Image: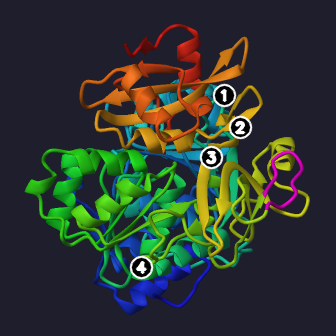
Amino acid sequence: MTESFDHPWLALEAAVAAHPGAEALVFPHQRARRSFAEWRDEAGRLAASLLCRGIRPGDHVALLAENRLEWPIVQMAAAAMGAVLVPLNTHYRKDDLAYALAQSQSRAVILSERFRSNPYLENVLALHAELPGLAHVISLDGADPGRLVLGYGELVASSISARTAPDLDLLAPAALLYTSGTTGFPKGALLTHRGMMMCARETAERLAIRPGDRWTSMIPLFHCAGCILNVLGSVQSLAAYVGVPAFEPEETFRVIESERCTVFSGVPTAYLALLQHPSRASFDLASLRTGTCGGADANPEVLARCAAEFPMPGLAQVYGQTESSTLITASAHDDPERFATSGPALPGFEMRIVDPQTDVPCPPGTIGEVQGRGPMVMLGYFGKPEATAETITPDGFLRTGDLGYVTPTGRLVIAGGRLRDMIIRGGENIYPVEIENLLQEHPAVAAIAVFGQADAYYGEIVAAAVRLKAVTTAAELAAFAAARIARFKVPARFYRLETFPMTPSGKVRKVELREMAKAGRLTPLA
């Protein structure tokens, strides 16, 4: 681990001083590699070129691109010039882009021309007249002078300056990350360099990441776990970040095998897909040593199997959200409780569990809302003071909206899912994750999401959408659950579903499932 720095550019400079020629960025699908020195130099030239074109410290610079080599270079250039990086969701289309670019007040957007079927450049150019504050459109795939589109390569080549770190307040805004948003337009969380660097550094220490490690991930770089935990964790550990454009199990296996990756980050749905994939045994994954699972409720048995069967002995459960600069808690790579809990609070964070209605702290073992306080907590939602006041308490605690409890050893267990997902059936509080983890053990269930459905008598009843890997019936699943949990928790309705509506961070959109069920768009399981 390098000496602690709370600015990305200083951490990169330290990495260059220690190991200038060591690989820092690897993107196999582009056949592209950069050493720490090459990363620093290219980012510095880009920063200098942007400054020459009128982008100033404090300006917002949007980035719309799939996971590719230029992504972390642009990220570091923004840090070097004191700009606020605005990563945009790669699923955004015209309406989403119009909202995010206008709401963020971005002065420039740097983008891929397209990704898959999404024409980023065409969409942004179509909106340009509606965005008077957007001064520059910069394509990672080459200039288009006829349409006033600058080229990334030309900007880098036009500057020979190696930009040094600016003298700025480490508590000033450094990144504006939009939440996944399961309903309505997302909110943009303003994060600081210090908060992001602390979160990445402390998590990397718990994972025992060391110089020469190779960290890959299925998480998009626009997500906080991608650009903060993975990228900033790698540079502070003198490890290489190995990027893939999107998650696909066999490609993930190939990258791990060919690049001898030692660290992997993913979400529960990805780990389950990797574990169940029929081709896994044909790949050599023995280089894996440690990694993280977060972003949604994790099944301890699945994590234990991944750790044993990949093998990946240091796999650890973690917990957090965008508003906390990625994580609040993280298990250590050798913690015996790392599968069943998401670990204790990171150094610098205070964590408490409170009654959601009163904010009164709960005793250990009692389920309540998880709250965290510390320098990793966002400054607030950009341009949304009321939403900020609703989310951060007067004494500085972040209301996560997640339900969990703390063990006697001080470790967090996410035991109830989202506060808004809690089901109240006839006055009884029901936590979907308990039922999901139980039914996930049924041999016919590949994936499951439990949600509340309106009912005239009980107020809500328990429903479950399942993806099956073998033949079963609703009655069999109900009987399986009834043998283990109270009758009022057993799903009254089961639906069969092949594809779940998901957020980009791997969370099931339960609001959408409820709407689908209400509209009769879910198929009942016989």
Q: Residue 334 shows which numbered tag?
A: 4
Look at the numbered discs 2 and 3 and tell me whether their residues touch, using CB distance below 8 Å.
no
Residue 127 is drawn in which quadrant? Answer: top right
Residue that appears at 52% across and 73% down: 203
State the CA–CA distance, disc 3 to disc 1: 23 Å
Is residue 31 something that shows in the picture? Answer: no
Identify the mark nearer the N-term, 4 or 1: 1
Position of residue 331 measured from the top left corner of the image (x, y, whole percent): 51, 71
* Amino acid type assigned to the residue bearing label 2 in the image: Asn
Query: Is 346 situated left or right of 270 in this image?
Result: right
Disc 1 secondary structure class: loop
The amino acid type of the residue labelled 3 equals Gly
Q: Position of residue 228 (x, y in %)?
A: 52, 63
Q: Judging from the image, what secondary structure is the residue with disc 2 in?
A: strand
Q: Main secondary structure of the magenta part?
A: loop
- State which tag comes first along the sequence, 2 or 1: 1
Task: Give the residue drawn at x 87%, y 42%.
Answer: 386
Q: Is residue 426 magenta?
A: no
Crowding near the residue tagged with mark 1, few <14, some 14–19, many ≥20 C-alpha atoms within 10 Å: few
Residue picked out by circle 2: 429
Give the residues in magenta: 354-362
Q: Which residue is mark 1?
A: 184
Which is more N-terminal, label 3 or label 2?
Answer: 3
Mark positioned earlier in the residue sequence (4 or 3): 4
Q: Which mark is residue 416?
A: 3
CA distance for labels 2 and 3 = 10 Å
- For the residue marked with disc 4, what is the amino acid? Asp
Indicate the amino acid at tag 1.
Gly
Q: CA distance from mark 2 to mark 4?
A: 34 Å
- Circle 2 Cα neighbour tier, 10 Å, few/some/many (<14 / 14–19 / ≥20): few
Mark number displayed over residue 210: none
